[in-house]
Image (tube, rainbow, N blue to C red):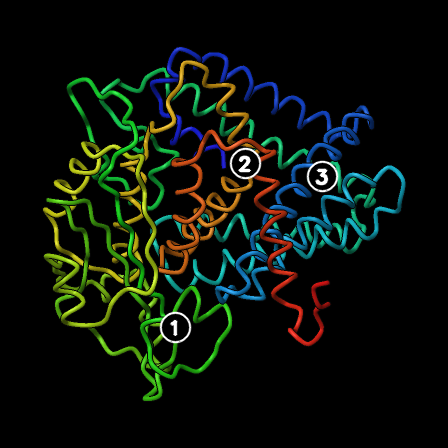
Amino acid sequence: MLKLAFLLIGPASFRAHWSAISVLGGSLILLAILIAANVVPAFAEIAGALLGLAFAAYGAAALAGALAARQRGAERLAWVLPAASVLMGLLLILAPFQSDLALGWLLAILFLTDAIGRVVPALVGKFRGWRLHVAIAAAEVLLAAMLILNWPLPRSQNIPLCIGAFLGLAGWLLLRLGVMLRNLEEEVAILMLPIFAGRGWYEHAPILVDDDTPPGRSETPLLIRVWTPRGCAVDTERMPIVDRYFGAVNPDGSISTGHSSLEMAPDVYISHYPVEERTRSRDHFLHALSASTDNDAPGIFQPSYAVEVANWVEADQEVRFHTYNARRLRAFWIGYRQDTLYNVVNRNCSTVIAGALDAALEGVLATPHPWRRLLGLLLNPDLWLAALMRVRADSATWTPGFLLDYVVPLSRIVDRPELSWSARFAWFLSRFRRSMRDSVPEAGRPEAA
């Protein structure tokens, strides 16, 4: 979440504040140690209450968005995470007034869920840095076991330990980022920093020698098109979550994984595709998800959307951006297209689109008041949703489903940063009322007087 916020605001706004960022990071680490050691119990209670407010606000906003999108075919399972977030937030807020048992079990379940989401893709994909994800998953399993077994520390101490770990990781990230910003040259993209470079998706991040002023709103939209696995397949068997984010099964048993592309008229069209598409069956699906060189294949770059539609079908989803940096996007594309190598996990149609979009959005929210903008972003549920997709993609890979759920909240962030919270709440409330009204059968509605 912090990395995405700093990416959108850009290094130019924060370069003069690198020391403040480092001090803030160090202070969070110190606070995390005090909370984890439970030296001052009031610290843990206050930090828990603040985290609870954050989780509850995020969950409530995400639930409202899911409810508003219900008639657009949103996944019912997409409600589970926001509901769990609201529940955990309330438990954190009420922790001083109730038993730690419920909160401990909920935290343990969330740790185990995240650990499974990390370790399975890491062991299957064996991508760059997969051992780190396995280590993080092992630590999460250990914390979950401590919370469930109430041993070797009592649950009343384990919960402050978890809160301290959360704050400590955020502080470590800020400390590293501040030091790195100090040494980052003005022409180098923030995406080149090591904290972004774990999977190698930003090796073509732009280096711009001349002045790079923040862009304004453009009348020419940046188009992200997504062929979702279920949307581009025919008569698929339903596999919730799997056919939303990974692949849908066709009647003949083959796997449809979807596709994604990016277009900026008149001269940029990014669509990476293997020269020979491999037929993926259920039996070979897991092998196809490996990032090993066995799955490397020659790739091609499609010339236009019209050619793709003529050879296949139209995309079933489209997202538009009007605020972006065209120069950075072109620089990224010039570097990426020098190599046509295609790998279904580490260099596929969606990894390039995510990388190109991040390059195009760097610094679009630049401001003379970066701390105020940073606080506004951290309070924005859309940033939480987009950051969640980045985490999931980093622990597996970018797929058309992950990409779609990433670009939708991002488009709201960059194209409507001035939207007030009162207006946002009114929008959610109107969608909620409309959804409730449409869910009542016609026969059950009261007749107008």
**Amino acid type shown at disc 3:** Gly
Q: Which mark is residue 52?
A: 3
Ranked by sequence position, the earlier of labels 3 and 2 is 3
The local secondary structure at tag 1 comes to helix
Q: Report the label total.
A: 3
Q: Is residue 88 left or right of residue 26?
A: right
Name the residue: 26% across, 18% down.
Answer: 185
- Residue 20 horizontal/vertical position (percent): 50, 13
Residue 75 percent coordinates (x, y): 53, 65
Residue 113 occupies which quadrant of the picture? bottom right
Residue 9: x and y in percent read 40, 26
Residue 420, above or below 290? above
Q: What is the crowding at mark 2: few (fewer than 14 residues within 10 Å), some, or many (at least 20)?
A: some
Q: Is residue 144 above or below residue 170?
A: below
Is disc 3 surrounded by few (<14), some (14 to 19) or many (20+) residues within 10 Å?
many
* Residue at the spot of label 1: 230
Of 199 and 399, nearer the camera is 399
Quadrant position of the C terminus in the picture? bottom right
Q: Tag 2's secondary structure?
A: loop
Could you tell me residue 262's position as x and y percent?
A: 24, 51
C-alpha span from label 3 to label 1? 36 Å
SS of the residue at dot 3?
helix
- Comparing labels 3 and 1, the label whose residue is closer to the camera: 1
Give the left or right position of residue 34, taking residue 382 as reference: right
Query: Counting other residues with Cα less than 10 Å from the Cα at mark 1, is it few (<14), some (14-19), or many (20 or more)?
Result: many
Whether residue 372 sits left or right of residue 219 in the image: it is: right
